[in-house]
Amino acid sequence: MDDRPVIPPPPTEERCYRHPSEVTGVHCTRCGRPICPECMIAAPVGHQCPTCVAEARREFRQGPGRRIAVANAKAVSVTNVILVILILVFVLEMVQSGLGSILAGPSSREAVDVGAMFPPFVALGQSWRLFTSMFVHFGVFHLLVNAYSLFILGNILEGELGRPRYLVLYLLAGLAASAASYAFGPVFQVSAGASGAIFGIFGGVFAVNYRRRHTAQGAVAMRAMAQLIVLNLIINVLLHSYLDWRAHVGGAVAGLIIGFGYNAPGRDTARRAAAIAGCAVVIVAVVAMVVVRTDQIRQLMGLPG
């Protein structure tokens, strides 16, 4: 009988699965494979390897991460996004014309360079100015007045209509305002500003509350919007040399038409049809005004229609 003590075999050397030349005694807490100091990524418990960390990030993006991103996107206010765009365009104007124009705004030529509407250019094919002019402003006070009105009333109407319908109303009212200014304003006058679209919001708020006119809240809101529209139109007439009242009327009428379409009585199908019809009426009116005015201006310039 052999009484000599049994000597255990030496432990097997473990090497990093990503760097076989590195000896290690640390294992990834996720997959259990050995990892060297270079591959150790701190985890809530222990360390994980780069492969497991990449897999965990991918799983998060495809699962909870995607749901979080979607929820965050749904929480974004369209009104606030528009406000950011207005500010960014104004910064671009200042870069274009210099800080000295922050109060008086850019010159007519500089405003046109940024995207303001100039009817002869629209008649020559630059119809995109009907859209871009909605985001250009003549000076910081012009911007602040419009931004304040948009922030207060825009968020109210967005909450009533929801983001998609609100955005459609805002953009179509803005286009209607630009088209009215183009169709009925002076041929050689530069125009810009978000006020036409904001008048569309006035009209939308009025229309939304029209069906609630029998309630105290609805009646107060409707009267307030009606008074605000009338007051602003009076100011526009008195200050017609400085304000584009045609754009404001066009935006307000478009907002009313679309708002009443959104709030038509009846079942869901009938209400959807009324909403589409209201938007279609505004689109047809915009196209008609632009086509007729373009033909008039081209004839004035001696160009073929």
Image: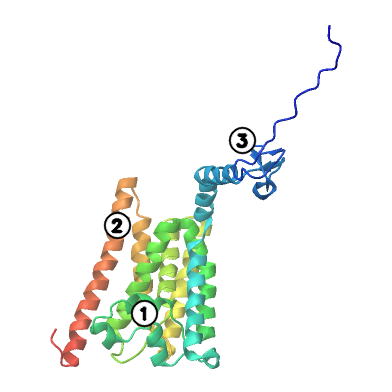
Q: Nearer the viewer, residue 218 or 160?
A: 160
**Mark 2 or mark 1: whose residue is earlier in sequence:** 1
Q: Disc 1 designates what residue?
A: 247
Mark 2 to mark 1: distance in Å? Answer: 23 Å
Question: Which type of secondary structure does the marked residue at label 3 adopt?
Answer: loop
Residue most extreme to the left: 304
Horizontally, residue 183 falls left or right of residue 214, namely: left
Q: Nearer the viewer, residue 32 or 121?
A: 32
Q: Is residue 267 visible?
A: no
Mark 3 burial class by Cα count in 10 Å: few <14, some 14-19, many 20+ = few
In which quarter of the view is residue 206 placed? bottom left
Q: Is residue 11 above or below residue 176?
A: above
Q: Is residue 113 visible?
A: yes
Specify the amino acid type for callout 1: Ala
- Percent from the top left, x then y, of residue 80? 52, 66
Q: Disc 3 designates what residue?
A: 31
* Foreground disc of the pair 2, 3: 3
In which quarter of the view is residue 45 placed? top right
Quadrant location, the C terminus: bottom left
Q: Is residue 102 above or below residue 27?
A: below
Label count reads 3
Question: Which type of secondary structure does the marked residue at label 2 adopt?
Answer: helix
Horizontally, residue 180 falls left or right of residue 167, namely: left
Specify the amino acid type for callout 3: Cys
Residue most extreme to the top: 1
- Give me the residue at 43% from left, 59% from top: 208
- Percent from the top left, x then y, of residue 144? 54, 79
Q: Disc 2 designates what residue?
A: 276
- Percent from the top left, x then y, of residue 303? 15, 89
